[in-house]
Image (cartoon, coloured by chain):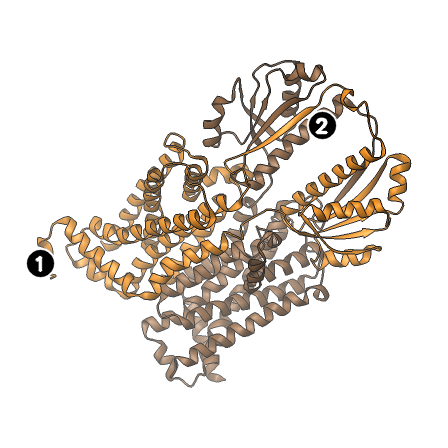
Chain colours: A orange, B brown
Amino acid sequence: MRARLPDLPFIRRTLVLARAEVLHVVRDRATLVQIIMLPLVQLLVLSNATTFAIRQTPIWVVDQDRSSVSRGLVSRLGASGYFRVEGASTSPEPANDAMLRGRATMVLTIPADFARELVRSGSDAVHLDVNAEKGSAAGVVQSYAAQIIASYARELDAELHPRVDAPRRGGGRIETVMRAWFNPTLDYKHFMVPGILVALVTMIGTLVTAQNIAREKEMGTIEQLNVTPITKAQFITAKLLPFWVLALFDLALGLLVGKLVFGVPVRGSLLLLFASAGIYLVVALAIGLWISTMVETQQQAMFVTFFLLMIYLLMGGLFTPVDSMPRWVQLLSELNPIRHFAAIMRGILMKGAGLAEIARPLGILTLYAAAMLTLAIRRYRKQTA
Amino acid sequence: MSALLGLLRKEVYHILRDRRTLTVLVLLPVVQVVLFGYSIRTDVTDVRLAIVDPHPDATTLALRDRFMASGVFRVIAVLPSERALDPLFRTDTVQVAIEFEPSFGERLARGEAAQLLVISDASEPNSGTARQSYVAAVVQQYESERTRTRGGIRIVTEARSRFNPTRASTNLFVPGLMALVLNIISALMTALSLTREKETGTLEALLVSPLRPWQIIVGKVAPYLAIGFVSVLLVLAEAKLVFHVPVRGSVTLLLAEGLLFILVALALGILISARTSSQRVAMMAAMMATMLPTQILSGFIFPLESMPRALQWLSNVVPAKWFVLIARGIMLKGVGLSVLWPQTLALAAMALVLMVAASRSFSARLQ
């Protein structure tokens, strides 16, 4: 077999090597399960967790008024669906304790004589203590509560002073109509499933490639490959091709699950999506290859891959928006391939973007693919020389 | 016992010999906390706005001025019709658009209701609704100044943010980041240790030695505990000096909890190592067990309360969840063990269970 290798044309020799890679993966059940099943499980489970939506936030009520007005206010909060009354007391100590222990996210304090003061002077204050340790939820919780309280005030007002002359006062009013485009039901999963999919295919593509060649180095089998007449281009193609196909397969499977289980919309062209994914995966795999040229052992390969992947994941706008980052981080994130691919995925799936609309991120990814591949191949040659 | 000391010495030599890896291990958390500390934020600022104003008049111009002066919006385009909006939204050039109905000013002057359509890119619902509420606030402000209604019933809400009055993103995320970064790096340090010995065949040598399985586990974990503790110190110093995150509670307690947390992560790594046969499988397992679960299920970015019941329950087995609660509790709330004992107990139990499971699945291999 080895003696006949030089006679084989370029393509066939590459394919033989690629076949060996495929066999390596398929033979090892544990790897196969990890590459195909684990991403699916993670997608199914974690997509449910990535939400900033507020519902059933535990609140504590300190009602020092104990009137029908104060009870009305508490019941409005409870009925909204955003809040759940975790406990109530007339003194502030239990409320403080509940907040310190994390049992309550907000404390509503209604002062004594609240109802009487409202009737007498038309205005009184309630206090909201929001646990701002709870991330961005704190701001949302507070504004929801303020809205509910304001609408309760209007309700009371209408009860107490029925107006006959209301429509004429100060001319007409501005009526704001809100419309949420691309995600009218405000479903987080539609946004997060594409993001988590991007994370999963990147993790698999980059880690498997980086580990693969580092392993050959560690075991010394790379020397054997180096003395065969296989060219660098053949070697690289054969190493990357199986994992490229595998990652695309993972993506297709994930999209299917996203569509069937989570109802993720597919508004744009699937062909365009997979073409972009093909280019993106070249970037992800070439980065893995580049890492493997820099390290000596699998352990080092793993550390470097994790380091890069965490930066990619957390600074690529998957979970927190790029627009919220400071200016210099936004500029830095232009170098992050995940940012561009996530924009493409979400653009095509949610917004129905076409080629013209994703031209910029796609162009950057194409450049990136060419640059990374060249870099990795050049570095690889140095090692074998 | 002397056998254990011998193994410990060997492990320490291994670590010290590979200077490059050691440097990476210590510096990695420090670099990541700086980078993520600056980049993980959820504040919605500098909103890109498009205005559709078919018939500009004094009223619409006045309202447009309000949007420009608000400091929250950046006006990207003023368009005569909504036809041009679509591509602007698709390329993410515009995040929110307001559209005045044709005779907006006239209708208001005549005492009729005038409609203002607010279109928001809600593909990310949190930012989408935040932007809508910013628009609503500007309009409401304008309205109340225009009409100056007499005082009806008014309930004033006096809101106060406890534990983080300025709601600085860094105060919220840096304690969580510490958990994330320390968890992943520690699990990785031990995840390959036994597997590598299996793959290279040197494990046989360890197995015929008089060392008991638990001694091998301790020998593999202890040196990394020291490295992990150095990382805890550095990361804490960084949180304080670079991001000015307060430490309102006891620093000693925080360090002790940090050490306990590192131990849990190292134990998780060694369990993965004991149960897998090749480095490839161990790596994938370590990645799948730490990367996304600690990012998503620890409550560090996404609030746990918003998750479905089943996932809230599942998050209990994620060690980072407990450490995020502990770190935020000590740093932001200034509470001590009297409040944090359940979380501490959970971490201690996890450390114990993982270590015992590792020694057991390891001794099963001896036969």
Q: Is residue A287 above or below residue B285?
A: above
| Labels 1, 2: front one | 2
Of A350 and A138, the residue lying toward us: A350
How crowded is the residue under tag 2: few (<14 C-alpha within 10 Å), some, or many (20+)?
A: few
Numbered mark located on residue B141 in the image: 2
Of B261 and B364, the residue lying toward us: B364
- Residue B65 in view, yes or no: yes
> Which residue occupies 53% across, 54% down?
B296
Q: Position of residue B125 (x, y in %)?
A: 56, 41
Left or right? Give the position of B194 relative to B353: left
What SS does tag 2 mark?
helix
Q: Quadrant of residue B235?
A: bottom right
What SS does tag 1 mark?
loop
Q: Is residue A326 above or below residue A3?
A: above
Q: Quadrant of residue B276?
A: bottom left
> Which residue occupies 31% across, 62% down?
A215
Q: Do marks 1 and 2 share a subunit? A: no
- Marked residue chain, label 1: A
Hey, what amino acid is under mark 1?
Answer: Arg
Q: How many marks?
A: 2
Q: According to the image, label 1 marks what residue?
A: A4
Q: Position of residue A44 (x, y in %)?
A: 46, 55
Q: Quadrant of residue B273?
A: bottom left
Quadrant where the image shows the C terminus of chain B: bottom left
Q: Give me the C-alpha separation between circle 1 and circle 2.
A: 82 Å
Q: Position of residue B231 (x, y in %)?
A: 54, 60
Q: Position of residue A235 (x, y in %)?
A: 22, 53
Hey, what amino acid is under mark 2?
Answer: Gln
Q: Is residue A184 above or below residue A56?
A: above
How crowded is the residue under tag 1: few (<14 C-alpha within 10 Å), some, or many (20+)?
A: few
- Marked residue chain, label 2: B
Numbered mark located on residue B231 in the image: none
